Structures are given as C-alpha cells and as structure tokens.
C-alpha cells in the first residue's frame, strides 16, 4: 500500500530473498517518497542517478582520476588535504570486508585475561552504582523504577570478541582487480543476510568487529558490546591505576549503559520489545531537566558563529553526563579499602577527570566541525568534556572550583539526570 509503483516480487528476487518475505517498513516516509519518484521522475533521471550510485560507491577503488575526484568531493566536508596512504586504506578495506575473521585473531591477541577480569569488575561496579542511583532518582516514580531495575538485571555485557565467526568457506575472492573481489564479498554478505529470513533471531551475533574502536548498546537486544580495541591506551591500560581506567573506559561504558534507561532506551523494555515503559509523569519530569541541557549546548560556539544543535545532540549529551557520573561513583566503590595515593601530585578524583578529558583528545579542521554540527548526534569532542563536567559538583570539588568559575554552571542552570 505504501509503494504501489514498486514491484516487490521483482525486487526480492533480485536480492535473492524469498518471494513471501515480510517487509519491515522501518522508514515509511522514505518509502512513500521513493514511490512518488518512481511514478513522477523521468526514466533518464533514474538511469543517471543509479549510474552515479554505482560509480560513486566504486570510485575510490577505480583508477586515479576517479579516486582523485572522489577524494576532492569528500574533502569539501572533511577538510582533508590528502588521501590516507595506500597501506592504511588497504587495512581499513580488509577490516571492513573480512571483519569477523580478522577480528577474532585481533581479539585473541589484544583482549588478555587481565583485561577481561578488570573489565568485568568495572561493569559490576557500574551496575551496582546505577542500581543505587535509580533507587534515588527524584524524577522517576516507583512503577518506572521497578521496570528500570528489571531491565538492568537482564542487561547482557559482551566484551572483547565473539566465540564464533561466520563460515567463510563459501567465499571465493578472485585474484586480479579489486572490484570483483569486493563484489564477491558483497554477494557473500548479502547471501548470509538473506539466509536469516524466516529464522529465529541469533541473539549471540555481534554487530561490530573486535578491531573497531567503539562501544554500543542494542535496545532491541538489551545488550552492551565493548570490542577488544577499546581495551588499550588511551582507553584502558592494565598498568594504569583504577582512576585512569574508570575515567576513560569506565565513563564510555557507563555512557552506553545509560542509553538503555534514557529517552531512547525508554522505547524498549527489558526483553527488547518495542514498548514505552515510562509513565507520562516521569517522562514530563525527565524532559523538563533535559530541556536545560538543550539550552546549555545550544549556547556552545564551535566555529565562528556555528553553534551546537542541542536538540540533535541531546541523547548523546545525556549519555555522556550519565556515563561520567556512573563511572565516578563506580571508581569510589573500586577504591574502598584501598590507599588513596597521590600520583604526580594528583588525587584519584583529579586523575579520573583528566583521564576523561584525555580520552577525547583529537584535532579537527573547521570544515569537518561545520559538517559535524549539522549531521552528527554527537557533540564535538571538546564539548563532550566541558559540557558534562561543568554540571558536576564532583568535578568542582576535585579541583577546588568556586561559583562563578567557567567550569561551574549556575545552580539554577545545572542539569542533574543520573
């Protein structure tokens, strides 16, 4: 009904899917607009557009004129002045095409038993802190609180690398030109996806690779995933003290955990079903606090007169503040009964916040920043540091900041969610 001009039987046959497959219309507005264009746009425009799509996707792998044109186009949005060296592009390409196979070897080397044990302890402390704080949240009522605790109990944490990888026996990569090789990988992955249709969901499957520096939370599975690549400096160092590791890695794990319990996570229950488990009253109280955060980030100037979009970045800004808050108190649990040693003249609390800041060190060109604030739900890195920390009395205490200092927000404007 959404797409009367699209012959789904032909389309499904073209991608190798069964003819009676159900279609998840996750983006109905897109489907309506695509159907309108199928009916109204001239065929020569469709041909030109689809021809461009094929060439654009292949351009960086074609001869130098195509690759150079592709780079010049991307540079308008990234500000890059030269392409990455060939070896780096080859490494990225291999990692993308054969991610799970490469990742298992990488994970076994990087994710040591020491790293696994420290990570498990860290997650246990983060869980315990979140449980305590959910119990004391002023904006969350008893009905919502009970379901939040149930969701926390069922949250699964995946660390390092998966135990199994896909069977690559059917994949035959031809020698010679890279385009047929990439095509072979694309067909293999398409066939692997199509084979899942009509079968139960494999809840053990990973949707990121161990060699990717990332962390993620899946609301539909209630699963936290932290790949092996995060368990190395500057995020994690087995030789570093707890303050440093909780400041960097612990805060980012807390960030992902908090996504399960915020304005995004409220849409999925403990079993991953699409169901809003907040009461209307709790949502209103949460939104009132969140609006102060929108105003805070709207005020940050990134480049010239370009401001952060506080509404676009709200979910990630909330998770940043939630993550660093949870990890700060998880560190306090980890330090119980241990000496609070000064290192380089810094207390554990000071080292914690400095580690969080160092975790976000990077250099960006102004062109890249302008693109980011228009398209990315994450704030630029500098503001992922000063934004949440300026709301935290714990940060002010650690460094002796006073009311009126740049990193101390006025009490009436301060945001407190977790």
Image (cartoon, rainbow, N blue to C red):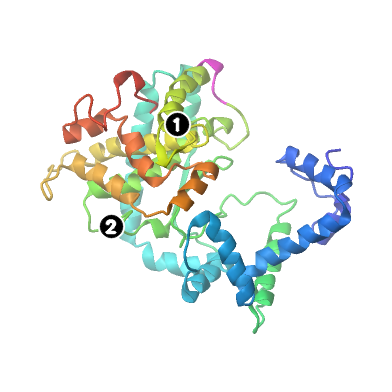
Q: What residue span does the magenta drawing correspond to? A: 277-281
State how far apart marks 2 and 1 are (Cα): 35 Å
Q: Quadrant of residue 251?
A: top left
Residue most extreme to the bottom: 176
Q: Residue at x 45, y 53 (%)?
A: 214
Q: Is residue 16 left or right of residue 410?
A: right
**Mark 1 lies on residue:** 298
Q: Is residue 172 magenta?
A: no
Percent x, y of residue 337: 16, 39
Q: Is residue 272 left or right of residue 296?
A: right
Q: Is residue 95 left or right of residue 237?
A: right
Percent x, y of residue 97: 59, 68
Can residue 168 be seen by looking at this rendering? Answer: no
Percent x, y of residue 345: 10, 46
Main SS category, magenta section: loop
Q: Secondary structure at mark 2?
A: loop
**Mark 2 lies on residue:** 237
Percent x, y of residue 34: 79, 45
Residue most extreme to the front: 304
């Amino acid at each position: 009904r959404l797409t009367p001009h699209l012959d789904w039987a032909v389309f499904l046959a073209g991608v190798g899917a069964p003819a009676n497959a159900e279609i998840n219309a996750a983006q109905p507005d897109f489907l309506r607009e695509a159907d309108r264009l199928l009916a109204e746009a001239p065929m020569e425009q469709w041909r030109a557009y689809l021809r461009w799509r094929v060439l654009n996707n292949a351009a960086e792998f074609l001869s130098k004129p195509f690759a150079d044109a592709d780079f010049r186009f991307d540079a308008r949005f990234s500000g890059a002045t030269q392409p990455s060296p060939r070896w780096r592009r080859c490494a990225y390409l291999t990692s993308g095409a054969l991610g799970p196979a490469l990742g298992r070897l990488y994970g076994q080397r990087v994710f040591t038993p020491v790293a696994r044990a420290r990570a498990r302890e860290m997650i246990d402390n983060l869980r315990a802190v979140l449980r305590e704080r959910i119990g004391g949240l002023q904006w969350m009522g008893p009905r919502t609180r009970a379901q939040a605790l149930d969701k926390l109990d069922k949250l699964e944490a995946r660390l390092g690398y998966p135990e199994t990888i896909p069977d690559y026996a059917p994949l035959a990569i031809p020698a010679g030109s890279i385009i047929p090789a990439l095509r072979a990988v694309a067909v293999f992955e398409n066939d692997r996806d199509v084979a899942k249709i009509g079968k139960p969901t494999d809840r053990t499957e990973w949707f990121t690779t161990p060699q990717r520096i990332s962390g993620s939370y899946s609301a539909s599975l209630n699963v936290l995933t932290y790949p092996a690549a995060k368990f190395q400096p500057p995020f994690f160092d087995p030789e570093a003290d707890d303050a440093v590791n909780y400041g960097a890695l612990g805060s980012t794990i807390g960030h992902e955990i908090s996504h399960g319990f915020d304005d995004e996570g409220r849409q999925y229950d403990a079993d991953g079903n699409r169901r809003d488990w907040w009461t209307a009253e709790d949502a209103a109280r949460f939104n009132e606090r969140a609006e102060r955060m929108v105003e805070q980030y709207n005020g940050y100037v990134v480049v010239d007169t370009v401001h952060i979009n506080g509404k676009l970045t709200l979910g990630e800004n909330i998770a940043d503040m939630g993550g660093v808050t949870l990890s700060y108190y998880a560190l306090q649990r980890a330090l119980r009964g241990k000496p609070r040693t000064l290192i380089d003249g810094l207390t554990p609390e000071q080292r914690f916040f400095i580690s969080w800041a160092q975790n976000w060190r990077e250099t960006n060109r102004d062109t890249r920043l302008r693109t980011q604030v228009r398209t990315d739900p994450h704030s630029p890195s500098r503001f992922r540091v000063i934004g949440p920390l300026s709301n935290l009395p714990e940060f002010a205490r650690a460094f002796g900041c006073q009311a009126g200092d740049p990193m101390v927000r006025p009490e009436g404007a301060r945001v407190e969610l977790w």
